[in-house]
Image: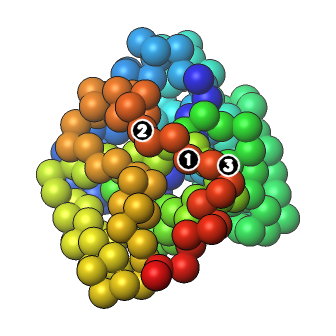
Amino acid sequence: MRICVYCASSPVVNKKYFDATESLGKEFLSACVEVVFGGGAHGLMGKLADTIIAGKGKIKGIMPKFMDEVEWGHKGVSDFVYTDTMHERKAKFLENVDALVALPGGSGTLEELLEAITLKRLGLFLKPIVILNTDGYYDPLIVMLERCVTENFMNAKHLQMWKFVSLPGEVIPAISSSTEWDDGAINFALSK
């Protein structure tokens, strides 16, 4: 299984997020998951890479060249793809993956996650999306996405596009039990 992980680069977030990331990395190692991530050496990205590398797992970094030029790239990751733009990077993230997992993060993580949800809504990305809601970090997003439906900006079927889980050990089972999605989703992309 090949899983793309969106997560933060900030090195100063609470330890609980680092602990959850390390636990998730160990879950991936146990399941022989190949990880695709943003390539960063710091924050949750760095912790994920360190965990996978220490366990002799497979990890691939995808990073724009300008970020690598300021030494954001993880030196221990040998499988790297460099892009010219952030847009190219996001497209590469979703190529040939079996699922997408979002960990807590800032504007970059949120932007990537919401773009993937939009692509799934349009039937352009069909894989499971699982959001690790460590200590309720994403509770406001849950409320916002549900409001999108109650205010008729999205169809109620769209609530099946993702799963929120609380613990790292719930991520792989959530991927396995995700609702099948197909390119016919574009037919109900408009809320009616």
The answer to whether 184 is drawn above or below residue 144 in the figure is above
Label ID, residue 111: none
Q: Residue under circle 2? A: 178
Q: Is residue 139 left or right of residue 155?
A: left
Q: Position of residue 160 (x, y in %)?
A: 39, 54
Q: Label 2, label 3: how many angstroms apart (C-alpha)?
A: 17 Å
Q: Position of residue 48 (x, y in %)?
A: 45, 36
Q: In the image, what residue type sits under mark 2?
A: Ser
| Tag 2–tag 3 contact (CB < 8 Å) | no
**Closer to the eye: label 2 or 3:** 2
Number of numbered discs present? 3
Q: Earlier in the sequence, mark 2 or mark 3?
A: 3
Residue drawn at (68%, 54%) of the image: 183
| Tag 1–tag 3 contact (CB < 8 Å) | no
Residue drawn at (22%, 49%) of the image: 134
Q: Label 1, label 2: how many angstroms apart (C-alpha)?
A: 9 Å
Asked whether residue 47 appears in the rendered view, the answer is no
Q: How crowded is mark 2: few (under 14 residues within 10 Å), some or many (20 or more)?
A: some
